[in-house]
Image (cartoon, coloured by chain):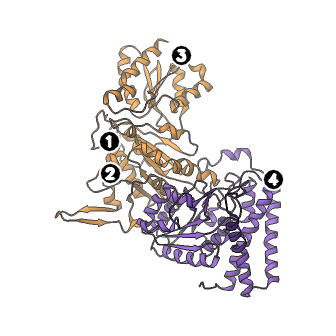
Amino acid sequence: MHAFPAKDKALGMYLSMYRIRKYEESIYYLFLEGIMPGTIHQSTGEEASAVGMLYDLRKDDWMASTHRPAGHDIAKGISVRAMMCEMFGKADGCCGGKGGAMHTGDISVGAIPANAIVGGNLPIAAGAALAFKMQKKDNVVVCFFGDGASNEGSYHETMNVAGLWKLPVIFVCENNLFSANTSIKLTCVQENVAADRAAVYGIPSEVVDGNNVIAVNEAAQRAIKRARKGDGPTILELKTYRHGGHSRNDACGYRAKDEQELWIEKKDPVKNFRKEILDRKVITEKALEKKEAEIENEIEEAVEYAKNAPLPANESALENVFWGE
Amino acid sequence: MAEISIAEALKSAIAEEMRRDPSVFCLGEDEDIPFGMGGAFTVTSGLGDEFGSNVRIPNQNGKGYTVKGADDIGNVRVLNTPISEIMLAGVCVGSAMAGMRPVADLQYGDFLFCMMDQLVNQAAKMCYMSNGQVHVPMVMRAPCGATNRGAQHAQSLESYFVHVPGLKVICPSTAYDAKGMMKQAIRDENPVLVFEHKLLYGGKRKEAGQLSASGEVPDGDYTVEFGKAAVRREGKDITIVANLLMWYKAMQAAEELKKEGISCEIIDPRSLVPFDYDTVLASLEKTGKLMIVQEDHYNLGWGAQLEAYIAENAITLLDAPVTRIAAYDCPIPFSPTLENYVIPSVDRILEGARKLARL
């Protein structure tokens, strides 16, 4: 059994998950309206992973995300407004409109620009961890990746040195069972695609219910502690599920109905944790509804701001090709 | 002033920068293994003695090894790595973003293809995609050029990277430039690819066909700015733009051509990104005739870009069509006879220059 955290932490984790859920819902509707450019890879259903992993991380610890970065970025502390502006391609976006949905980041809160090459962020996270080690800092790096990334060469090249050099990095496989449309069972013999391939690199691993924010957070604390005191990396495999498609226009016809019902109806991390904090009387329902309304309001304001925010100047497209130029 | 080889010049640049700045570190396969080669071409051999490396040294009594640094990577500044090019480049990107200045050695430039994602999608784009929040001051050293090793250890790959916004590409070819440009590369805030020609190193490892590029190098600290071409020989009839080994061949040809009354001006661009078009234009004002010589293949490449630039911006300076001499468009063959045929030779430069002079 997992130890239930202090009330303010439990509430804080819930509200962070709720913020991600509502942000992603609002993005979804803006796409349906046809007013948001580009594509989306939504993290709805995977909020417990982002929040559980990042809640105890320090601001100056780093986080490396993937093409599905919104949950991670918001949990790490990027404002909803800066995220929303980036989605609209506006100058006030966290990357000035140059990054877009798959590259959101804000290094001032330790969020490395997200990486849209599957497995591309793994050696970069290891490199940042090596830098912290060489600089005698106690910072750690949390690096998210999907089940599909465990089949990339970069995964194996990176795990080899991370284990060998005892780098302060926590590798987090969000195993949502599908690499885009393809079941992970069609591409791996392992049941646990990352965890079962950890021991060969001398890296301890855990398989965790990725939809249980407390379970995720406990595993995160263990891994962060190990990394911070110099004992090296951990691979955490979080079993989770995306509520929506891989990207827009993906109706998920390749997923079984009963599987979807199980994960979306019965194992919803936000709905279930809400019930738990109410059952444990962390907060009254009325007070919680008020806090939820505040978050909804924050997101609505961000949307309104982003819609009306200035577009980037054309000339800015040629800036920062090289640093400071 | 001391006369040293390019290999020694590069080593001394890296060592001096490591002394000056604790964030500089070296990494690569065989980077500095005791009694090993120091990369593939001796450049980094011995650096571990001063800066620490992860090594296993055979004991003098003939029994077993003494291990150093392997359990203490945080204190090692000359890092012997696995043969994992994606990791090598990715660790450079991540450590550079986090405040280090990695100088990686690839052994053979041909292995750049194994790390293309990390160079092109990651290193080159991180600063841009983040709108300048992060930047990537890393150096990737890529030995290049055909040296009787067959098609996968022979290529001149500069042009692939000239095409990528966000990467700087340099090709130093004298001891003076090698030291000054390597220092500049390490101090640059952006990813820099350094192409070093295997036949110009002048290291302890001898190569068939190598040239002596040893030269005088000042004792004190100096850098050579990127984007400034060097006029290696002044002349008035033909402008020859050639890099790395090719300008040395052009110099040999120019001596012959002088006897025939043809005067060649030879320009070594030294850096391809940024590229110094102005020095070429100034030379064409005098000569009106342009020859480009590159060891890379003919089809596209930096030479074609230069030719296109002149056609777009300064065609009135030309009195004749441009002559471009490059490796033929086939993989580089092993047989020394075939390799000599495919790579631009002094004879091909002579033949091209004579034709161009008559036009």
Read off the residue under disc 3: B320
Whether residue A77 is visible: no
Judged left or right of residue A34, residue A153 is left
Tag 4 subunit: A
Chain of the residue where label 2 is placed in the rendered structure: B
Instruction: Answer whether labels 4 and 3 touch (C-beta < 8 Å).
Output: no
Q: Which chain is tinted orange?
A: B
- Sequence-wise first label, 3 or 1: 1
Q: Is residue A311 visible?
A: yes
**A265 up-or-down from B289: above or below:** below
Mark in the foreground, 3 or 2: 2
Q: Which residue is mark 2?
A: B38
Residue sitting at the far top: B358
| Outermost residue, left side | B61
Determine the secondary structure under disc 1. Answer: loop
According to the picture, the residue beneath numbered tag 4 turns out to be A35
Looking at the picture, which amino acid does disc 4 mark? Answer: Ile
Mark 1 vs mark 2: give the one in front: 2
Where does residue B183 sit, x and y in percent of width and height?
A: 44, 48
Bin the neighbour count of mark 3 within 10 Å (Cα to Cα): few under 14, some 14-19, many 20 and up. Answer: some
Image disc number at residue B5: 1
